Amino acid sequence: MEAAHHEKRRVSISGMLQKLGVSRTGYRSWINRRPSKTQKRQEEIKTKIESIYNNSKQNYGAPKIAKKLKQSGEIISERTVGKYMKEMGIKAQW
């Protein structure tokens, strides 16, 4: 769809759904779906991780960030922090 947008062509959603093998009701339910509590918490944690990471001048890795989060009252493991950092594409600078 994005490529068609750049070329100023109109793309019918019905045609795209048919090509992808997705039903209209499935598409509509996906569009109207709200984020779960888990997804909301993950986004909050990722925001905190990014803040701590940037405040440390990008020096802190997962162990130190996990320690800072625990000090602020979050219950999170070092492994989870590392996983989120990898998803976000950030890592400690040497």
Image (spheres, rainbow, N blue to C red):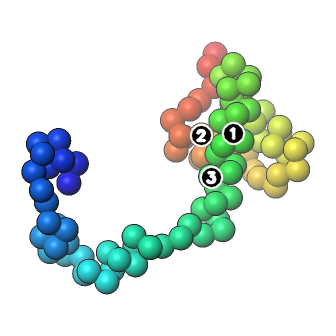
Which of the marked residues, 1 or 3, is nearer the chain's N terminus?
3
Which of the marked residues, 2 or 1, is nearer the chain's N terminus?
1
Q: Is residue 42 left or right of residue 71?
A: left
Q: Is residue 67 left or right of residue 8?
A: right
Q: Are marks 1 and 3 in contact (CB under 8 Å)?
A: no
Q: Which element carries disc 1, helix, strand or loop? A: helix
Nearer to us in this view, 57 or 60: 57
Q: Is residue 71 above or below residue 58?
A: below
The residue carrying pointer 3 sits among few (fewer than 14), some (14 to 19) or many (20 or more) residues within 10 Å by Cα, namely: few
The residue carrying pointer 2 sits among few (fewer than 14), some (14 to 19) or many (20 or more) residues within 10 Å by Cα, namely: many
Disc 2 designates what residue? 85
Q: In front of the other: label 2 or label 1?
A: 1
Most extreme residue toward the top is 94
Disc 1 designates what residue? 49
Q: Position of residue 18 (x, y in %)?
A: 14, 74
The residue carrying pointer 1 sits among few (fewer than 14), some (14 to 19) or many (20 or more) residues within 10 Å by Cα, namely: many
What residue type is disc 1 on?
Ile
Q: Are marks 2 and 1 in contact (CB under 8 Å)?
A: yes
Q: CA distance from mark 1 to mark 3?
A: 10 Å
Quadrant of the rendered image containing residue 13: bottom left
Residue 75 visible from this viewpoint: yes
Q: Is residue 92 above or below residue 78?
A: above
Disc 3 designates what residue? 43
Q: Which element carries disc 3, helix, strand or loop? A: helix
